[in-house]
Image (spheres, grey):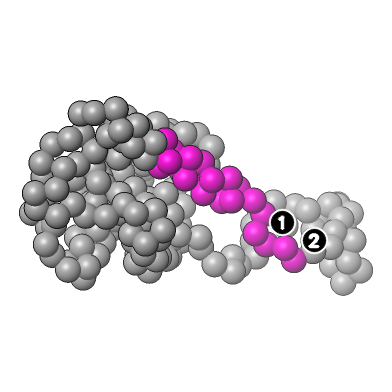
């Protein structure tokens, strides 16, 4: 492997980590820009609380309906990159990114990261055999893995007696993630130039694929 190939390899690995951090940054931003009126006169206070305190307590309990569930874009890009250029997303980088996301998003640390890592490694093992398949076959393969990971995550958390999100919310997030996968593939292919290797091409490690 020459110096140029090594530089490209590490640049793309760093790009994936930075991409994940950018997505996490925007994920943590408050996207609901509707003003929060704590002192509205129409609000009836809860028992023994002032109206503002009642409104704040209601907001903290999140009793109002959520407008939409954001897709797991990091998961989408991890699958798209694993399917196209496995060497750009090594297991260590995937484990680091998703474990960091677990900690930042207050998920049970390690569970989602482990399941996603297993799923991405499974995709890497299928990449060569599905290299000539069309996008529909890729979408179905990735979709099956996403569904399995989501259900396994929910089951393991339930068996461990950990407070789990409502299944409807998990399925809604899964549906949004599946719908956004074609967009992440388009961005990956067209803008980031992370494409499937053709037979006989050299990968970033200098090996023929």
Residue 36's disc is: 2
Q: Does the magenta portion include 19?
A: yes
* 20 left or right of 115 in image: right
- Which residue corresponds to the image point at 34% horizontal and 48% vertical from the top-left? 78
Nearer to us in this view, 5 or 96: 5
Q: Is residue 86 left or right of residue 105?
A: left
Task: Give the image location of residue 118, x and y in percent.
Answer: 23, 41
Kindly state the secondary structure of the residue where label 2 is placed: loop
Q: For residue 194, which numbered disc appears in the image?
A: none
Horizontal side, residue 60 vs residue 194: left or right: right
Q: Where is residue 169 in the image (x, y as percent from the top left)?
A: 46, 61
Q: Is mark 1 on a helix, strand or loop?
A: helix
Magenta stretch bounds:
14-34
Quadrant of the rendered image containing residue 110 = top left
Magenta: main secondary structure equals: helix
Q: Residue at x 64, y 51 (%)?
A: 29
Closer to the eye: label 2 or 1: 2
Which residue carries the number 1 mark? 59
Vertical comparison of 136 with 28: above or below: below
Q: Quadrant of the N terminus?
A: top left
Residue 15, percent from left and from top: 43, 41
Looking at the rendered image, the quarter that the C terminus falls into is top left
Total marks shown come to 2
Q: Which of 38 and 186 is in front in this view?
A: 186
């Amino acid at each position: 492997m020459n110096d140029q190939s090594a530089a490209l390899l590490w640049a793309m690995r760093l790009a994936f980590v930075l991409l994940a951090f950018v997505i996490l940054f925007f994920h943590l931003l408050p996207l609901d820009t509707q003003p929060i009126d704590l002192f509205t006169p129409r609000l009836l206070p809860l028992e023994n609380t002032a109206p503002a305190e009642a409104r704040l307590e209601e907001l903290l309990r999140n009793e109002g309906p959520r407008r939409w569930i954001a897709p797991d874009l990091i998961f989408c890009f991890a699958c798209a990159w694993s399917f196209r250029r496995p060497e750009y997303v090594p297991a260590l980088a995937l484990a680091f990114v998703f474990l960091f996301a677990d900690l930042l998003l207050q998920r049970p640390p390690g569970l989602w990261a482990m399941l996603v890592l297993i799923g991405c490694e499974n995709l890497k093992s299928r990449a060569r055999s599905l290299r000539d398949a069309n996008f529909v076959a890729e979408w179905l393969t990735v979709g099956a893995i996403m569904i399995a990971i989501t259900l396994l995550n929910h089951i393991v958390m339930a068996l461990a007696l950990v407070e789990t999100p409502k299944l409807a919310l998990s399925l809604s997030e899964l549906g949004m993630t599946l719908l956004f996968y074609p967009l992440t593939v388009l961005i990956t292919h067209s803008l980031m130039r992370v494409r499937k290797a053709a037979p006989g091409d050299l990968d970033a490690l200098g090996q023929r694929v």
